[in-house]
Image (cartoon, helix red, strand yellow):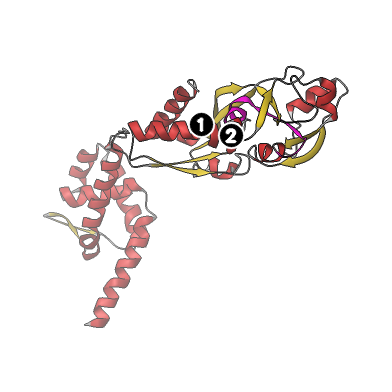
Amino acid sequence: MLSMTRERLAIWDETMTKLRNLDLNLLKVLDAIVTEGSVSKASERLSLSQPAISNALNRLRTAMDDPLFIRTSQGMVPTPRTRTISQPVRQALDLVQSCLQEDFTFDYTLSDRTFVIAVEDYGEAVILPRITDWLSQVAPSIKLAVRPERSYVIQKELFEARVDFAIDYFPLHDEGFDNTQLFDDSLVCIARQDHPTVKGSLSMEQYVSLPHVVLTQKPDRTHLIDRKLNKLGLRRNHAIEVPHFLTMPLIVKDTNLLATLPKRIATIYADSFPIKLMPPPMPFENIPIFLVWSRSLESDPGHQWLRSSLYDLCQRI
């Protein structure tokens, strides 16, 4: 008895393995013949010619190593193997049909989806609090998982849609990504409030001679400030490079170093640290802030909703 059960289980496992490798259309033919009991009626059911049904049946027989049906005067009689698999095949086809007909709408008021966002400290300070406050009001069950890595570090995860969005200073123009600019931000200089030489405005001589805290750049990029200074034959004194904006006021408040950073985040820091904001001694380009995502998520309804909402929200920052 036990050996018989093991034999049936072995046959079942073998059958399921073969079914997983079959063309879905062949399984539809198998189901139609089981349901209709004849090749001619199965052809009518599937709107296929009888030769096409017969050809599909031959392929099934070869793949399953079983006759599957015995032709009799009463019609096509299923073999024991066909009777064993007919119900799972029917259920699988129903599941596929259900998935294809599913309404892929997104109701943000009911969804408890978690969106993963890669964002650096600029986005954490300037954008994230507003997103969090807004979500708590309009979609309280939706969650955010924040990844602090820069977008170029997690580009693979972004491409594979394991990260929904990256908020960064540089767009990704590689194939497979889409970008939209959320807004831009002007640059300001910061110094400690009781700086011994920087009193009111900041002269160009002071700007290039005093030591600076600067943000670490990508290996293949030069900061836009340094690019512009280089064109004038000038250079900043890079005393220390730091990976995050937040480190800048922590150093500046207790030293004579300067730092140049986006105005929105500098204004936030000025509320917490004894620093002062000043315009730079020459105009610099604004810093663009981009939203980046995988093109594979372009038509995802939930992603579309949050993407559009983030853009609208950032227009008011």
- Residue in the foreground of this view, choosing between 158 and 236: 236
Quarter occupied by residue 168: top right
Q: Image quarter for residue 15?
A: bottom left
Q: Which mark is residue 113?
A: none
Q: Is residue 176 visible?
A: no
Q: Answer above or below: position of 95 versus 280.
A: below
Task: Mark yes or no: residue 121 visible.
Answer: yes
Residue type of the residue flagged with mark 1: Ile
Query: For this view, does 98 lie left or right of residue 176?
Result: left
On the image, numbered disc 1 is attached to which residue? 127
Q: Residue at x 28, y 45 (%)?
A: 53
Residue 264 belongs to magenta span: yes
Span colored in magenta = 254-269
- Name above or below for residue 47 compared with residue 34: above
Q: Secondary structure at mark 2?
A: helix
> Badge 2 is on which residue?
122
Residue 87 image point, x, y percent: 21, 56
Residue that extends furthest to the left in the rendered view of this protein: 74
Q: Are marks 2 and 1 in contact (CB under 8 Å)?
A: yes
Which residue is rendered at x = 52% and y = 34% of the image? 293
Badge 2 crowding class, 10 Å Cα cut-off, few under 14, some 14 to 19, many 20 or more, is: many
